[in-house]
Amino acid sequence: DADVTQTPRNRITKTGKRIMLECSQTKGHDRMYWYRQDPGLGLQLIYYSFDVKDINKGEISDGYSVSRQAQAKFSLSLESAIPNQTALYFCATSDTGGGKTQYFGPGTRLLVL
Amino acid sequence: ELKVEQNPLFLSMQEGKNYTIYCNYSTTSDRLYWYRQDPGKSLESLFVLLSNGAVKQEGRLMASLDTKARLSTLHITAAVHDLSATYFCAAERTYSGGGADGLTFGKGTHLIIQP
């Protein structure tokens, strides 16, 4: 079984709808991250969490919110989706401390019409 | 603000040739990461470089870090078709006391290796 899972894997929604992307991990890591990938732009950090009580904004947090329900679960919400949020979204986890490899989930492809 | 620039962004090369991908970053960072992404897939960790002068090798790939020049390189030796992928470098912003947050990625180098 995969260490980092994301649901759904693909989603089509309409402008203005609320949508939640979920991430679960079995690696026992404290740190979890949400990134979005747009073609030709690399990955950009949306939010990150160093433990259940520690959540921080990344470089592009506007329009997004997150919830860390447990050490193993980190969800990303789009309260009112807009077309320019169409992207590939990745969850990642890492062990505590700097210089630790981030392990990425399979990604969720989101299309906002 | 930490910025990461890769070049080239696109590279087409023949099997058997050598080439280098460059990754420059804008502010102090002692931690540099290289990832590989195949089309439609997730990111796979290749190397983590944690100090000035660090060099790591795996098969035909070798990565190095020069923190004074704020430069990391990914060198490909005798390329083979299976190495075709997009390669990303990422730097980790660090703070006094050892704290850090998420990664800042370059735009990626799309590498095609032709037989």
Image (tube, coloured by chain):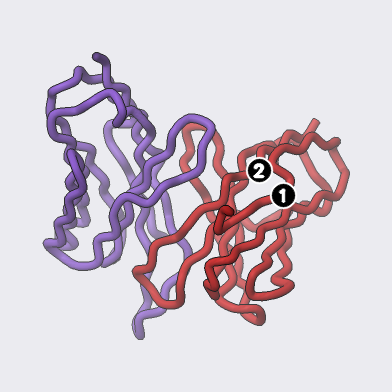
Chain colours: A red, B purple
The amino acid marked with disc number 1 is Thr
Place of residue A103 in the rendered image (x, y in percent of width and height, measured from the top left): 47, 57
Residue pictured at 47% horizontal, 63% vertical: B102
Residue pictured at 34% horizontal, 69% vertical: A99
SS label for mark 1: strand
Place of residue A2 in the rendered image (x, y in percent of width and height, measured from the top left): 57, 53
Place of residue B56 in the rendered image (x, y in percent of width and height, measured from the top left): 18, 55
**Lower position in the chain sequence, tag 2 or tag 1:** 1
Is residue B1 or residue A13 the one in the foreground?
A13
Q: Name the mark on residue A108.
A: 2
Badge 1 density bin: few <14, some 14–19, many ≥20, Cα 10 Å: some
The reply to whether discs 2 and 1 touch (Cβ–Cβ < 8 Å) is yes
The amino acid marked with disc number 2 is Thr
What residue is shown with label 1? A7
Residue pictured at 41% horizontal, 49% vertical: B105
Q: As displayed, is residue A9 above or below residue A1?
A: above
Mark 2 vs mark 1: in front: 1
Residue pictured at 70% horizontal, 75% vertical: A70
